[in-house]
Amino acid sequence: MENAIRKRFGLNSNALKLIAAAAMLTDHIGYKFWAQLPVAAVYACRGVGRIAMPIYCFMLVEGLFHTRDIKKYLLRLAVFAVVSEVPFDLMIFDRVIDWKHQNVIITLTLSLCCAAAVKLIEERMKNAALKWLLTALVIAAGCEVCVLARTDYSAVGVMMVFAFYFGRKNKLVTVLLLVFSNVILDAALFGADNLWFKYLMAPEFLSLFALVPIFLYNGERGRVSPVSRYGFYVFYPAHMLAIYGVNVLIWL
């Protein structure tokens, strides 16, 4: 039954990335133009945007298990993490550089490093107890680095990646870990930080709706081209620059 649904309504990798990109753009429009938009519109934009990060985390894990060269994959992410920092700071803070908060690709890059390390531990470590101990230490280290670096999504982003890593063969594990990361851990880390805006305008439990397109993933990559390979990376800094530019025009 599940395979029949995927065959008929299945989404390939490119389709999932398009959904995530559209959701992210919608989210950032709601974030940046909250003063110009009706409250209901801001709520809708921010709510739709909650599905973007889980999809990106899911695709990150898929990339880890299907890439031919993990070093090139990491390098590509790291390059775009650096390139995206100025557009991110411009959109969020209206400044070229601001160290209070760093862009989400840094979170994804650090998460990929941790996931690659855990994958290596699983492949080479024989002792089960030592394997789980090292895995826990790697995940804890990744979470701590993201918290200290003040990256977007912070430790929540790392745990989302591992929700999909450990849930690759068990959807219930994915759901439970997503609930933990996006509801419990998120509330613990950020509950006191701008509570009204974060939870009234963008309740994190809405991110669980990302599981609908994710569970429809058919395992196929889709059409391969330079646009599909690099376009989604370029879109991240490009759309933030565009939003910043529109905001500047509004206030002229």
Image (spheres, helix red, strand yellow):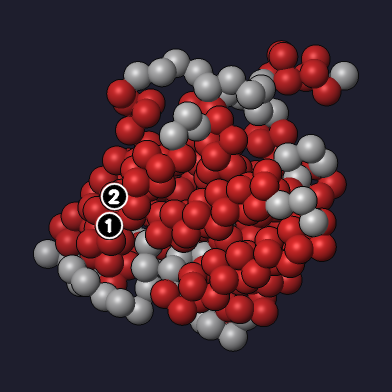
Picture layout, residue 189 above or below residue 65? below
**Residue at left 77%, top 51%?**
126
Q: Is mark 2 on a helix, strand or loop?
A: helix
Look at the image and tell me whether residue 149 can be seen.
yes
Return the x and y of residue 103 as percentages of the image width and height: 37, 62
Picture layout, residue 249 above or below residue 59? below
* Residue that lies at the very extreme toward the bottom in this rendered image: 192
Return the x and y of residue 36 as percentages of the image width and height: 35, 63
Q: Which mark is residue 117?
A: none
Total marks placed = 2
Depth order, front residue of 135/12: 135
Depth order, front residue of 191/157: 157
Q: Is mark 1 on a helix, strand or loop?
A: helix
| Residue type beneath disc 1 | Val
Depth order, front residue of 248/224: 224
Return the x and y of residue 64 as percentages of the image width and height: 55, 39
Drawn side of residue 184 relative to residue 251, left or right: right
- Residue 133 occupies quadrant: bottom right
Return the x and y of residue 239 as percentages of the image width and height: 30, 47
Mark 2 is surrounded, within 10 Å at the Cα level, by few (under 14), some (14 to 19) or many (20 or more) other residues, namely some
Tag 2 near tag 1, CB within 8 Å: yes
* Residue that lies at the very extreme toward the left in this rendered image: 252
Residue designated by label 1? 82
Label 2, label 1: how far apart the Cα atoms are: 5 Å
Q: Residue 79 carries which label?
A: 2
